[in-house]
Amino acid sequence: MPVAHVDLDALRSNFDLLRGRLSPACRVLAAVKADGYGHGAVAVARELEAAGCDWFGVATTEEALELRQGGVEGRILLFGPVFNRIPELVAADVALTVPGFEALEAVRASGVSGARLHLKVDTGMGRLGHPPAEALELARQLDREPGVILEGVWTHFARADELDRTFTGTQIELFASFLDELQREGLRPELAHACNSAGLLAYPEAHFEMGRPGISLYGYPPDEVMTDLAPTLKPVMTVTAPVTFVKRVPAGTSLSYGGSWTAERETTIATVRIGYADGYPRVVGNRASASIRGELVKVAGRVCMDQLMIDVGDLDLQPGERVTLFGPEGPTAAELGSLAGTVSYEILTSVGPRVKREYNR
């Protein structure tokens, strides 16, 4: 079966690098949403908790409760608004994001006491939260609300991975001004946070009280233009799959759906047990490389739902040998993503449940 090998030493090395970019007083929130970017949320969070991580960020109620059920004791922030199961989340000590008045009303209607809330301010991402003027009124209402704690205020950078710093600079100014306004009204919460991986690496002036690394924890810069800011990041995941069938084919043989690949010479074709249902992108057929015995070989023909084929030339392979589809030695998830017209994030988070996770050091 396909296996995603997760290198916990590499994960901890990346955490230590990112932790070192922050001041000693600054907290770290590790984004472990989307099943820890495909690496396994509980295993990742437990490893990072042992390394000293303070907080964990998730996208859904189910993700938050999975961490608690998996023994994760650190603080958890749910990034998106929730409108149900609020008492269950508060009982599990999960902090909730309030991006608007409807989310506040849902907390109020739930009748909970002691809910920890983080106010989301929109400074330019446009996804959640109100602009500062409206967010200030929401902060006032949160402060007056009995039984809740305004623990944090946050924003999210939309373009911090770009070389042009103008847009992000404006976002930082808007957020800092908003914090000043809160301070003047005596509403300044314990935690202000803004930096995703790109912000953490490129904008030390915006670290505030907490950084929120995501993709960089898993070994990839947010964009290739940022590679020099963290050249020692180590990709954490390697995906391998077994050869299931090997045959010699003559020149002129076509392969897979549509016959989009034709052998130019006599060669050996190996079928590999992984496909787009496992998260390997269909669009990279005939273009992507894989690695076997340390040699790069080409994916031949269209990627199928459960299988793909590789042209291994004159290698004498046997069923059971394993092929590396992506990993730190190459091709990387970023390189595969580039071929697929996407990013490393999508490649990693697409690795499906049919791919077994194995943890090693």
Image (spheres, rainbow, N blue to C red):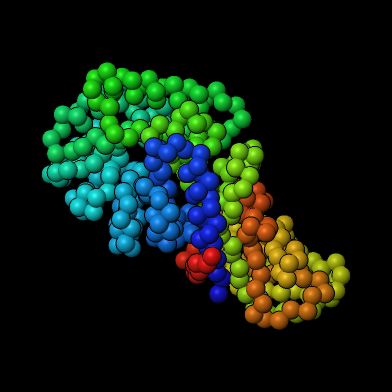
Query: Would you say residue 92 is visible in this rendering?
Result: yes
- Image location of residue 68, percent across then percent down: 30, 58
Quarter occupied by the C terminus? bottom right
Q: Residue at x 59, y 64 (%)?
A: 239
Observer-nearest of 157 and 84: 157
Quarter occupied by the N terminus? bottom right
- Image location of residue 66, percent across then percent down: 33, 59
Q: Residue at x 73, y 71 (%)?
A: 293
Q: Residue at x 14, y 39 (%)?
A: 147
Query: Would you say residue 351 is visible in this rendering?
Result: no
Q: Residue at x 28, y 43 (%)?
A: 96
Q: Is residue 34 above or below residue 258?
A: above
Q: In which quarter of the view is residue 104 placed?
A: top left
| Residue extending furthest toward the front | 24
Observer-nearest of 74 and 285: 74
- Image location of residue 162, percent across then percent down: 59, 32
Q: Is residue 14 left or right of residue 338?
A: left
- Image location of residue 133, percent across then percent down: 32, 20
Q: Is residue 38 above or below residue 295?
A: above
Q: Is residue 206 above or below residue 296?
A: above
Q: In which quarter of the view is residue 40 placed?
A: bottom left
Q: Is residue 301 left or right of residue 161?
A: right
Q: Is residue 328 above or below residue 244?
A: above
